[in-house]
Image (tube, helix red, strand yellow):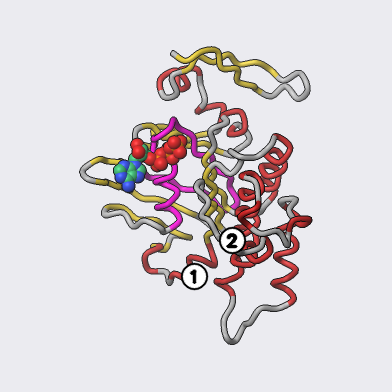
Amino acid sequence: MRLAAERIDWRVHGHRLLDDVSLAVAPGETFGLVGPNGSGKTTLLRVLAGLRKPRTGRVLVNDASMYAMRQRDIARTIAFVEQQAETLDRIVVREAVALGRTPFLSALQPWSEQDDAIVDQALDNVGMAHLADRLWHTLSGGERQRVHIARALAQQPRILLLDEPTNHLDIRHQLSILSLVRQLSVTVVIALHDLNQAMECDRIGVMDGGRLVDVGSPSQVLTAERLHHTFGVHVDFLEDPHDQRRIMRFRNAL
Ligand SMILES: Nc1ncnc2c1ncn2[C@@H]1O[C@H](COP(=O)(O)OP(=O)(O)OP(=O)(O)O)[C@@H](O)[C@H]1O
């Protein structure tokens, strides 16, 4: 599904958190959002998820305004893994993941074996099947993050929004979650701080002070000038001898 934002402005107490942001993400594309702390990535993702309705501008899902969609249809279409995971006390991992099926259940369509299979698959995809019966509050930060991702996968969304999905994960789980995300044939918008990981996205958008200041392929966008001006670091580009891809080595904060 195509996801687009048109001229989004978001203000809080006169402070402009999003400033005239427009972008269009193609069906099946993995779009990386990068930018320094406080540049507006989370705010933009919340707008794209429909959790915040901007005073100006709109979000389009397959060219139709999101604001004309029913809440349930939005939940059937878009899954959002937020950075700050909420606490779900006295709930086991499997139940937390099963919440992803809620938008699809009704009196006419009660929980079925197929829902069980989808939850099993989602738990397996994030390597959490062995902890399915553990109480949520006993999980580590990285395990919780993987459960949140599993809940989003169980939602079987057409559009997946991820806010720093790897920030609590060990390196093996970082790589496996990112490769899983790339394999999904859904539209993905993913906020990432690790710029070398962002290089794997189809395209990247750079946020700076609430504005989307650049969009393009990773190598077009992540130039030495951009890293200097927006991120305040000096970068050297190296070549990976294994596959000749570009690696960024950050030298010092400017
Ligand atoms: N409710 C609010 N009231 C006032 N300021 C806010 C509010 N929510 C966010 N902000 C500010 O808006 C700016 C953008 O925040 P946002 O969380 O979108 O940034 P971010 O790019 O996701 O940052 P990070 O990389 O640190 O996660 C920040 O300066 C933040 O302090």
Looking at the image, residue 8 sits to the left or right of residue 197; the answer is left
> Which amino acid, by three-letter code, is at mark 2?
Pro
Q: In the image, what residue occupies the spot 48% across and 65% down?
A: 74
User: Residue 73 got which mark?
Assistant: 1
Q: Position of residue 151 (x, y in %)?
A: 62, 59
Furthest residue in direction left, as rendered: 14
Magenta span contains residue 249:
no
Residue found at the very far bottom of the displayed protein? 108
- At label 1, the amino acid type is Asp
Write down which quadrant ligand 1 falls in.
top left
Residue denoted by label 2: 157
**Regarding mark 2 in the picture, which secondary structure is present there?**
loop
- Describe the element under mark 1 as helix, strand or loop: helix
Question: What span is in magenta?
Answer: 21-49
* Mark 1 closeness class: few <14, some 14–19, many ≥20 residues within 10 Å: few
x and y percentages locating residue 76 in the rendered image: 54, 67
Location of residue 208 with respect to 44 vertically, above or below: above
Q: Residue at x 54, y 44 (%)?
A: 190
Query: Is the residue marked 1 within 8 Å of ligand 1, measured from its CB?
Result: no
Give the crowd class for mark 2: few <14, some 14-19, many >=20 residues within 10 Å.
many
Q: Is residue 105 left or right of residue 132?
A: left
Left or right, 218 with reference to 10:
right
Does residue 20 appear in the picture of this structure?
no
Which of the pair 78/83 is nearer the observer? 83
